[in-house]
Image: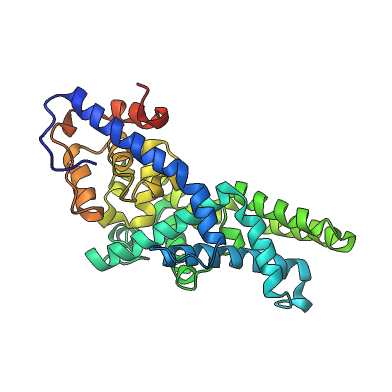
């Protein structure tokens, strides 16, 4: 991006540089999904990000296994075969939105581990969360405690490369249940059982109680204090990414993907659109991409203009 070339002299040239970088990043993102699907499905292709691909494959298998557990019932739990898991996992893989979400979770875990190694940042209880739970009673404290518990469970699941079905966003839970129902529909007995499973899962599901749901509720509950969640060293990766998504009006998975080193223009614009000043944006880059400097003149770009650039398709339209 965003390199150490000659400083731009005007706000127009800063915008032009950011637009060009945003377009490059978006073009790469546009080609990433089909490539990622191919790499996740093709187990015999050695690639540089094998750990991330293995994590996505494992989360797909985790979701498929849980769905099959429910389909078979308590008496037959874990009686399904690896082949059945692979078939259902392959069907889930065919949904681009679900694949993008799993990719986002893998990237979030990667960022969480990076911040722990680089800043000694606790992956569960960030400084911001500790100040909330030891503060006065009220909604933020209660939500903070609930989120810490959910974050701890997520970290444990990520270490095992698992993802509980109940942690999916509602639209993706619908995808998973529809996929199960479609595959089970070839056998009348299984089709009937799949309907029972779907009703049971939906009855137990509460999107507001998921880790991502709790994170969003917590950031919103802070009001103007939510700006503090845009300091990644203070909030931790999970709340930072949630605050970035809310502040820049992006989907959370898009905000997660913006932390990748091919999406630095999107990250800079997202932080600026969220209301951070240029110095604060630089501080977040120092934590996430310490080798990168923002272009001279970036401070001339205000939050409204950054949001407009961010929302323009491929970064071109103003």
Residue 148 drawn above or below residue 174: below
Whole-percent x, y for residue 215 in the image: 44, 52
Whole-percent x, y for residue 104 in the image: 45, 53
Front residue of 138/60: it is 60
Image-quadrant location for residue 124: bottom left
* Residue at (18, 42) in percent of width and height: 3
* Residue at (34, 51) in percent of width and height: 260
Whole-percent x, y for residue 160 in the image: 49, 73
Q: Is residue 85 left or right of residue 26?
A: right
* Residue at (26, 54) in percent of width and height: 288
- The quadrant of the picture occupied by the N terminus is top left
Q: Please, which colouring scheme is shown?
A: rainbow
- The quadrant of the picture occupied by the C terminus is top left
Image-quadrant location for residue 163: bottom right
Front residue of 57/66: it is 57
Q: In this view, does 213 lie to the left or right of 265?
A: right
Residue 139 drawn above or below residue 114: above
Marks counted in the figure total 0
* Residue at (11, 34) in percent of width and height: 7
Is residue 136 among what the camera can see? Answer: no
Q: Is residue 91 left or right of residue 304?
A: right
Is residue 262 among what the camera can see? Answer: yes
Whole-percent x, y for residue 94 in the image: 62, 52
Front residue of 116/40: it is 40
- The outermost residue toward the right is 188
Residue 61 drawn above or below residue 301: below
């Amino acid at each position: 991006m965003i390199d150490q070339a000659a400083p731009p002299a005007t706000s127009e040239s800063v915008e032009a540089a950011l637009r060009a970088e945003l377009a490059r990043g978006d073009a790469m993102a546009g080609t990433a999904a089909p490539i990622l699907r191919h790499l996740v499905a093709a187990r015999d292709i050695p690639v540089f990000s094998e750990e991330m691909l293995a994590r996505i494959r494992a989360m797909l298998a985790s979701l498929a296994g849980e769905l099959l557990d429910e389909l078979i019932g308590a008496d037959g739990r874990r009686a399904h075969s690896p082949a059945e898991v692979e078939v259902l996992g392959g069907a889930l893989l065919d949904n681009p939105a679900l694949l993008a979400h799993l990719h986002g979770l893998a990237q979030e875990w990667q960022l969480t581990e990076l911040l722990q190694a680089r800043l000694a940042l606790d992956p569960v209880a960030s400084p911001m969360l500790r100040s909330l739970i030891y503060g006065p009673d009220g909604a933020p404290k209660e939500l903070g405690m609930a989120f810490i518990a959910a974050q701890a469970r997520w970290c444990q699941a990520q270490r095992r490369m698992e993802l509980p079905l109940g942690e999916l966003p509602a639209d993706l839970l619908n995808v998973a249940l529809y996929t199960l129902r479609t595959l089970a529909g070839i056998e009348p007995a299984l089709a009937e059982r799949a309907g029972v499973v779907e009703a049971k899962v939906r009855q137990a599901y509460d999107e507001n109680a998921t880790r991502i749901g709790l994170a969003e509720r917590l950031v919103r509950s802070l009001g103007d204090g939510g700006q503090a969640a845009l300091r990644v060293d203070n909030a931790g990766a999970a709340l930072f990414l949630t605050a970035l998504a809310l502040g820049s009006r992006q989907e959370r998975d898009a905000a997660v993907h913006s932390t990748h080193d091919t999406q630095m223009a999107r990250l800079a614009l997202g932080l600026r659109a969220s209301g951070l000043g240029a110095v604060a944006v630089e501080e977040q880059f120092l934590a996430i991409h310490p080798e990168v400097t923002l272009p001279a003149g970036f401070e001339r770009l205000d939050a409204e203009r950054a949001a407009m650039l961010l929302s323009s398709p491929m970064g071109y339209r103003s």
